[in-house]
Image (cartoon, rainbow, N blue to C red):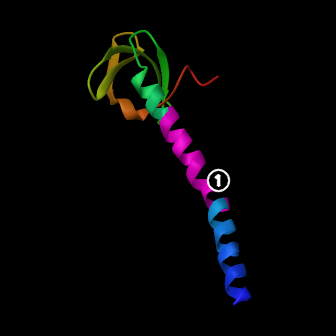
Amino acid sequence: MEQYGTTIIYFAVLAAIFYFMLIRPQQQRKKQHLQTVESLEPNVKVTTIGGIIGTVVNVREKTIILKVADNVNIEMLKSSVAYLGDGE
């Protein structure tokens, strides 16, 4: 019977390690990304997950308009923004 208790404790410890090493950090990154997307506003420089650097011209419900060069604007999903700034 003592062997089963040890096995249960072993699996509980493994589950805790799994949670704190994999699940929790991913949830924190997701929360931070959501905050970044919600804070988008015009005249903010952003870098997308594809590596495009541009300035937000307009913010819509699900998309943003990025100015990437003179007279060159592209429409992208808000979720494609990796982070604010130009990646330096």
Q: What element carries label 1?
A: helix
The residue positioned 60% from the left and 57% from the top of the image is 19
Amino acid on which disc 1 is placed: Phe
Q: Position of residue 6 (x, y in %)?
A: 72, 80
In reply to whether residue 54 is colored magenta, the answer given is no
In reply to whether residue 29 is colored magenta, the answer given is yes
**Residue farthest toward the bottom in the current orientation of the protein:** 1
Q: Where is residue 73 in the image (x, y as percent from the top left)?
A: 33, 18
The residue positioned 39% from the left and 34% from the top of the image is 79
Q: Position of residue 28 (x, y in %)?
A: 55, 40
The residue beneath circle 1 is 20
Query: Residue 10's quadrant in the figure?
Result: bottom right
Q: Is residue 65 left or right of residue 26?
A: left
Quadrant of the rendering where the C terminus is positioned: top right
Q: In this view, does 35 lie to the left or right of 4?
A: left
Query: Residue 57's quadrant in the figure?
Result: top left
Mark 1: few/some/many CA within 10 Å (<14, 14-19, 20+) = few
Q: Is residue 69 above or below residue 32?
A: above
The residue positioned 48% from the left and 21% from the top of the image is 46
**Residue farthest toward the left in the current orientation of the protein:** 61
Q: In this view, does 45 lie above or below 48?
A: above
Q: Is residue 32 left or right of residue 39?
A: right
Main secondary structure along the magenta-highlighted residues: helix
Query: What's drawn in magenta, residue-wise?
Result: 17-32
